[in-house]
Amino acid sequence: MHKKAERLKKMKPVVAGNLTDEQRDKLPPGQTLTEKFPILHEGEVPVYDMSKWNLRVFGEVEEERTFSYEELLALPTVTVNTDIHCVTRWSKFDTVWEGILFRDFLKLLKVKPEAKYVMFHADPDYDTNVPIEDLLRDDVLLAYRFNGEPLTDKHGWPLRTVVPHRYFWKSAKWLRGIEFMSEDRPGFWERNGFHNEADPFKEQRFSGEALDIPEDEWTRKEFD
């Protein structure tokens, strides 16, 4: 076991060579540009019986709702081309996602005015918190396709969030629940040494706290 937050603080970013001026401008500080898509997660990749799978919406709402996968697929779809940035110091440019724009999904719900935050609940036993204001952008999705194909199991099939302007742990794989909250509270990594806001361009990686969790440097991980 290693203290992930403390270990990453000590890692030196690899200097990216042969970048254009545009790429340098787009690359957050301390990041390395890669064409790979590293596979990082805690726990085992879940296996689903899709006849029983659903997405639960609860918390500060007038009525709880559940959506089947078929109901989600029937909603209007958008395609987003965006850059993504992982706290383990890799960035990948021009990734293409398809899914439901989160702010459009909100229109289907009776969210109470006092709801200011969302906790995304995901398998296995994962959660991450994001302010609602952060989820109203043109590029925040409930995503089910990547690069024109359904998500693979290891990248979050059947449904994940994509919140690209935050470090990628805020983009939860294997999404199962959306909880609306009147007050903020930390999610899994936020409780375990990582920053609550996670802005890559401000290098908001760490909270100063640390917990013993497995090492998962992206250069040693499986990737697509």
Image (cartoon, rainbow, N blue to C red):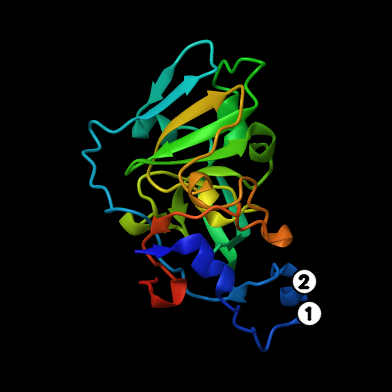
Task: State the SS at label 2.
Answer: helix
Callout 1: 10 Å neighbours few (<14), some, many (20+)?
Answer: few
Q: Is residue 137 above or below residue 37?
A: above
Residue at (67%, 89%) from the top-left corner?
A: 18
Report the Cα–Cα distance between label 1 and label 2: 6 Å
What residue is at 59 percent from the left and 48 percent from the top? 163
The quadrant of the rendering that contains the C terminus is: bottom left
Q: Disc 2 marks which amino acid? A: Asp
Residue 64 x/y as whole percent: 44, 16
Q: Secondary structure at mark 1?
A: helix
Question: Quarter-wise, where is residue 134 in the image?
Answer: top right
Q: Amino acid at mark 1?
A: Asp
Decide if residue 140 is on the left or right side of residue 38: right
- Image coordinates of residue 193 in percent, x first then y, are 53, 53
Whether residue 82 is situated above or below residue 119 in the rendered picture: below
Residue 31 appears in view: yes
Residue wearing tag 1: 21
